[in-house]
Amino acid sequence: MNPPSVWIVNLLVVATRKVDSQPQPGIVEVTVFDAYGTQWQFIDKYPIFGLCYEIDTLLFPRAALLPCQVLEVKPEQNLVLVGTANPYQIYSTNDEPAVFWVYEDQLSPRSEIYFANF
């Protein structure tokens, strides 16, 4: 039996600072405000956020992407409920996967929405 497919999107976030150059390839912090004004921060290796440069040459702040799973959509309100547990187990700075509402225009228009099996 195949596991259910999930809908993955890229959320537009801001990489705010380099946390550390170790472990390789380096760690950065990103931040985003949800649809209700709550600030969320995440720290992980920079390639997770779509940053493909050497960590020591990055200038901050800069645009980045946070891969998220779509959990629910409210098209009449332009809202999308996203979670960070899939596909990469990205945890917020309070050490838990985050679930929060964002506006549709906070999703990257250039990223393709895709389905993945987990």
Image (tube, rainbow, N blue to C red):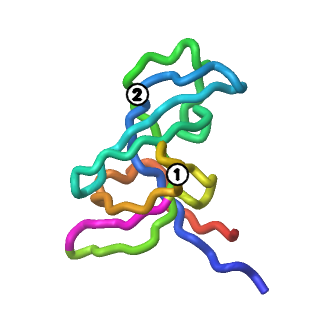
Name the residue located 53 percent from the left edge and 24 percent from the top edge.
19
Quadrant of image for the N terminus: bottom right
Of the residues tagged 2 and 1, which is closer to the observer?
2
Quadrant of image for the C terminus: bottom right
The amino acid on which the numbered mark 1 sits, given as a three-letter code, is: Pro
The amino acid on which the numbered mark 2 sits, given as a three-letter code, is: Thr
Q: Is residue 82 magenta?
A: yes
How many residues crowd around disc 1 within 10 Å: few (fewer than 14), some, or many (20 or more)?
many
Vertical placement of 73 versus 22: above or below?
A: below
Contact between labelled residues 1 and 2, with CB atoms less than 8 Å apart: no
Q: Nearer the viewer, residue 89 or 65?
A: 89
How many residues crowd around disc 2 within 10 Å: few (fewer than 14), some, or many (20 or more)?
some
Vertical placement of 52 versus 99: above or below?
A: above
Residue at the bottom extreme of this rendering:
1
Q: Which residues are magenta?
A: 77-83
Residue at the front extreme of this rendering:
94
Q: Which residue is mark 2?
A: 16
Q: Would residue 22 be found to the left or right of residue 72 on screen?
A: right
Q: Is residue 48 magenta?
A: no
Q: Which residue is mark 1?
A: 67
Q: Nearer the viewer, residue 69 or 112?
A: 69
Q: Spatial distance from mark 2 to mark 1, Cα to Cα?
A: 17 Å
